Amino acid sequence: MDFMVFQYPMITIQACLDGILLGVLFALIAYGMALQWGVMNIINIAQGDLVILGGYIAYFMYLFGIHPAWGVIVSPFIMYFVGIGIYKLVINKVVDRDLFISILATFGISILFMQLMNFAFGADVVLANSGYGTTFLFDSNVVLPNSKIFSAVVSIVFAICLVIYMKKSKLGRAIRATAQNARAAKILGVDTEKVYAATFGINAALCGVAGALISITFTIHPYMGLPYTIRSFMIVIVAGLGNLPGVALSGMGLGVFEEFADYLLGTEFRIGSVFLLLVLILVYRRFKLSRKREYLK
Amino acid sequence: MNKNIILYAAILIFGLAAPFIFPAFKVQLSILCVLIILAVTWNIQGGEMGYNSFGNILFYGLGMYLCASVQVGMFFPLAEWTESGGEKTFVHTPTQFFQGMAVGLLVAAVVPTIVAGLIGYSILGLRGHYFAICTLGLGVAAGEISGGIEIIGAGQGFTTPPFPNVGGLEARGEFFYFCSFFALVIAFVTIRAIYSTRFKLILNAIRDNEDKAEAMGIETMKYKIIGWMVSAFFCGLAGGIMGGLVGYIDSTDVAFDGREMGVFMVLMAILGGKGTLWGPIIGATVFHIFKEGFWTFFLGWQYVALGVLIVVIVIYFPEGIMGWLREKYPERFGEVVDEADRKAQVELK
């Protein structure tokens, strides 16, 4: 099996390019994860399900005859309000509590969303056809669907916009202040409750963008949420909170890893290898830190 | 003390007589026993040790696959068995079935324990939410990977050996009920014995402040691993029994079912009250009655109800039933209450 990688360099190039384009998308989702983790100290297990929900919005636009690429604009708007709704109903009650409570509560939301989507949209694997065609490279040995390139470009644009927004706008400053020290921010007149709601909304909107892009480039299915959560969690712990280039790089690295796992081990082990990689990364970090008698916290 | 003995005797007699009193609910009662085992053993690390694991489903599924594989593999070629799917060309004689089951359950309990011991050192070094997510990843990875292994049925599933034709129609239910009830009794006695020793205090010390416990000279890692191994032993045993009871093993829907069993065990322990001996038992019973009683009304909406239930319990009821009782009747729990202090607290509320 592994001889393939060396004997057919084209497969290697194909896997690398696929992985990098995919990884940009993962990085976008992970950025949302890092945002809410840093600001609210919450690990959102329902992250992946928000992504899938965003994907279904784009898919429905496609069904109604609108080009699914417009989903990139529409889905974050809808998802922003979904995010605010989730925050008002559930998340604001777990913000200050034990982290495990928030993990379990969002796990409940995840199950709820999974099943509601299953009822509403059916258990079929769906795909919104963008009709963008494909690009052939290296004597058509490497095949790249244009939709993947499109999705990577759009993710980068959104990420850059968000970074500028966080740096320049008033809300962005408030969010960063709350992340640094919520109490001090409150004393200085920041309405932290509003900031939390906005953070969760922005995170959901990012998930909406990513979901719309995923519905164009890959497939969506109600039960496919959890792997996206795990991927973004993994990217965040590898890169660290607030390390944007790190998030982008580790996202691409994860994408490439997945493509190679897909080629070498077979598609049925793809998701399994992602979860196993998470365990390995955590264990590696744990041993590295335990030499200094520290631990992950 | 005397009262306790009478209570335990009453429960034991009720447990032994239950399948004959409620013959229609034998399967439900066996599932209840398995659920109680899972909740009580989850409570060892989740409640007492403060290590909230989503990954005990790993041992449960492992036990399930191991028990069935041993039961088949002892007498027949395993690969041909799984390949034939539902249409069996091999039939277990009663002796073979029971022998296989006995050895299978032993293996199902011992191997997960060893696995827990081996991975314990690496995994239990993580703390808090890292531990929770890591174990979640372990459980899902096990499900995905076992779904790709041919010899145990891959995506097609694994049919466990059918119960041999002895003792009439009722025998199957009774056999599995007594298996699970016996396992529950062993689990309860073991855990009760553990909880009355210094071991429990050490686990509680780890939960309250691990660094301080270590500074006091306790080898925390050793006790954490032992705690996890006890948990894994009974999870594997419960999985083995459940595999035989269900009769069909699928990698992600039955064995490594993180969406159902994996969450149930956490939920039951929290519902009853983490960190108490009786809490998880009460929680599991209430949960099972609720699940079986109302699940049919939700018809297809079970998972929606489950999601809502998780959110509601976690947000509004994190102390559980035992925690609520403790707040209401602190005297029963051996707490000395200062009446004036209590009044002041009530007024404050």
Image (spheres, grey):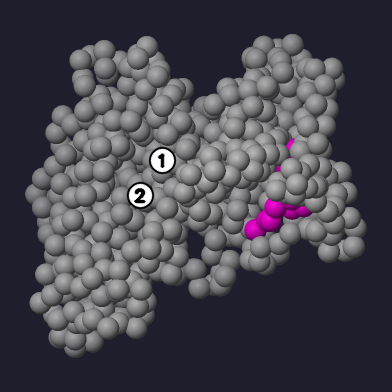
- Placement of A109 over or under B202, stated as above or below: below
Q: Helix, strand, or loop for circle 1?
A: helix
Q: Is residue B16 left or right of residue B270?
A: left
Q: Is residue A133 left or right of residue B178?
A: right
Q: Which residue is mark 2?
A: B58
The prevailing secondary structure element of the residues shown in magenta is helix
- Residue A297 at x, y percent in the picture: 46, 22
- Placement of A168 over or under A54, stated as above or below: above
Q: Which residue is mark 1?
A: B135
For the residues beneath circles 1 and 2, the answer to whether they share a chain is yes
Marks 1/2 in contact by CB < 8 Å: the verdict is: yes
State the extent of the magenta-drawn residues as a range: A206-221
Q: Is residue A255 left or right of residue B316?
A: right
- Residue A200 at x, y percent in the picture: 70, 35
Q: Residue A32's image quarter?
A: top right
Numbered badge on residue B98: none
Name the residue located 78 percent from the left edge and 23 percent from the top edge.
A163
Three-letter residue code for mark 2: Leu
Chain of the residue under label 1: B
